[in-house]
Amino acid sequence: MNKNHAKLLLKLIFIIAALAFVFSKVEFEAVISQIKSVSPFYLLLAYILLVVAQIISSFRFSYYLETLGVSVNRLFCIGFYFAGMLCNTILPGGIGGDGYKVYFLKKHAYIPAKSSIRLIISDRASGLLWLLLLAYGAAYISAAHNMIIYFNYLLLVAVFSTIIGYLFSVRLLLKESLQTALGASVYSFFVQIISLLIVFAILKGMGVDDGYAGYGLLFLISSVLSIIPISIGGIGIRELTFIMGAAPLGLDADIGVAIGLIYFVINLICSLNGLFFWHRLEKLYK
């Protein structure tokens, strides 16, 4: 067994173990019932929103490429991003989306691997910044506000620490100008806002009328945790997050698990757009 196969096996073991634990805590039939209850209109809306989020993410990547002096058309960047998304979903134990991006940029744009890796880390760091900031906002609005002593003071410390830590990292570690970081953060803000809207669309489709801030908070936390490469498309991680956080926030765990599973399926379907671009990227780049 080679290294890539071992990674894939470990991820599959984690997913199976995580979902087994999740379904030991909820009623399988109840979760399936929640999934079946979602209006097709809102499922389509959630899918469209995810596509839009990926397109905006591709524009952010194009923006970063321009900082390296590489000018590409927007259609190429959209296809490039979806191709990377496809790699992350279909080849989770192999080259992966980030590895594919580094390979393509080195081969066709003549960007050194070190510069490409720095660009990809910057891209992810910008998204992480707004994941955290929006999570703090959701925590303030949700029941979490009343669960922690001195919450407001801790929240202010967290917000300032996150912003300062981000600016420090991109300036000193990634050698990125503050102007570049701030420009990219505009794209990231809209990407993460749309991510929340996807969750709200799913909730609306289920007929859920309250607890949006709490479900949004748990989804944002799960998105941060999904950065850890122990899953495929975040499955298992999101469901575990909803299981662990539902009760303290007074939320329905069945609904939370259903959100996680529905999002995974929508994300999987969205990644298939990469098939359309896969053999066209070289032509689009030229």
Image: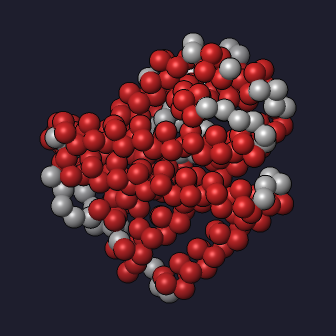
| Quadrant placement of the C terminus | top right
Figure check: 286 above or below 118: above
Residue at x 60% of width, y 21% of height: 284
Please say whether residue 197 is visible from this viewpoint: yes
Residue 251, picture quadrant: bottom left
Q: Position of residue 258 (x, y in %)?
A: 28, 43
Q: Foreground residue, 230 or 81?
A: 81
Is the N terminus in the top left, top right, bottom left or bottom right quadrant? Answer: top right
User: Please, is residue 81 above or below residue 177 in the view?
Assistant: above
Q: Quadrant of residue 8?
A: top right
* Residue at figure coordinates x 70%, y 71% from the top left: 164
Residue closer to the observer: 151 or 283: 283
Question: On the picture, is 148 further left or further right than 72?
Answer: left
Q: Position of residue 78 (x, y in %)?
A: 54, 32
Q: Determine the residue positioned at 60% across, 58% down.
A: 185
For residue 169, say whether it is visible: no
Horizontal relation, residue 83 to residue 246: left or right:
right
Rendered residue at 63%/27% (across/down): 96
- Residue 136, position in %: x, y? 49, 69
Asked if residue 94 is positioned above or below residue 250 in the image, the reply reads above
Q: Nearer the viewer, residue 162 or 186?
A: 186
Residue 285 relative to residue 226: left or right: right
Q: Nearer the viewer, residue 281 or 270?
A: 281
